[in-house]
Amino acid sequence: MKLEFQSQRMEKQCETDRSRSKAFGAQRAKLLKKRLSALVAASNLEELRNAPGRLHTLKGDRAGQLSLDLDGPYRLIFEPVASAALSESSTPWCQITHIRIISIEDTHD
């Protein structure tokens, strides 16, 4: 799958083991590396639907975005590039092959 980043800062934070650890701490950095590697290795989101990380769509003001669990309440937030808003029942998971990483954050705040 093709990945892009919403900001240059986010891209730099996710680029290397060292930059991930510095930005997010060692434990979260390890999980982030696993999730990013899984995203890159997948052909589309359907392949990750039942993989570790609990891939799921978000609701409310985050409708159209997806999330993968990291540690605790922290999530890797991303969205499909050039796609309509997502909904759990009508998402064309097998057609999503390009995503934009938005943030790593606690979505419950």
Image: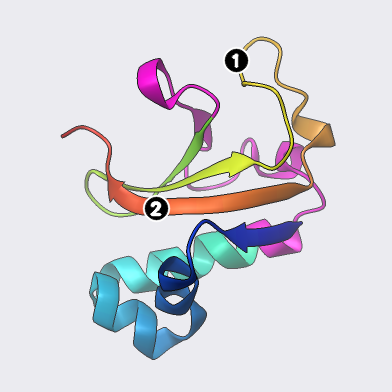
Residue 81 is situated, as x and y percent measured from the top left of the image, at 70, 42
Q: Is residue 32 above or below residue 25?
A: above
Q: Is residue 28 above or below residue 103?
A: below
Residue 89 is situated, as x and y percent measured from the top left of the image, at 65, 10
Residue type, numbered disc 1: Ser
Residue visible at 42% across and 26% down in the picture: 62
Is residue 11 part of the magenta span, yes or no?
no
**Callout 1 crowding tier (Cα within 10 Å): few <14, some 14–19, many ≥20:** some
- Chain-order first, disc 2 or disc 1: 1
For the C terminus, the quadrant is top left
Q: Is residue 85 above or below residue 33?
A: above
Label 2 residue SS = strand
Colour option used: rainbow
Residue 82 is situated, as x and y percent measured from the top left of the image, at 74, 37
Label 1 residue SS = loop
Q: Which residues are magenta?
A: 39-64
Residue visible at 62% across and 21% down in the picture: 86
Disc 1 marks which residue? 87
Residue type, numbered disc 2: Ser
Taking the view exactly as shown, the residue that stands out farthest to the left is 109
Q: Is residue 78 above or below residue 39?
A: above
Marks 2 and 1 sit apart, C-alpha to C-alpha, by: 20 Å
Residue visible at 70% across and 63% down in the picture: 40
Taking the view exactly as shown, the residue that stands out farthest to the bottom is 18
Disc 2 marks which residue? 103
Residue visible at 27% across and 75% down in the picture: 23
Left or right position of 63 against 51: left
**Callout 2 crowding tier (Cα within 10 Å): few <14, some 14–19, many ≥20:** some
Give the quadrant of residue 38: bottom right
For the N terminus, the quadrant is bottom right
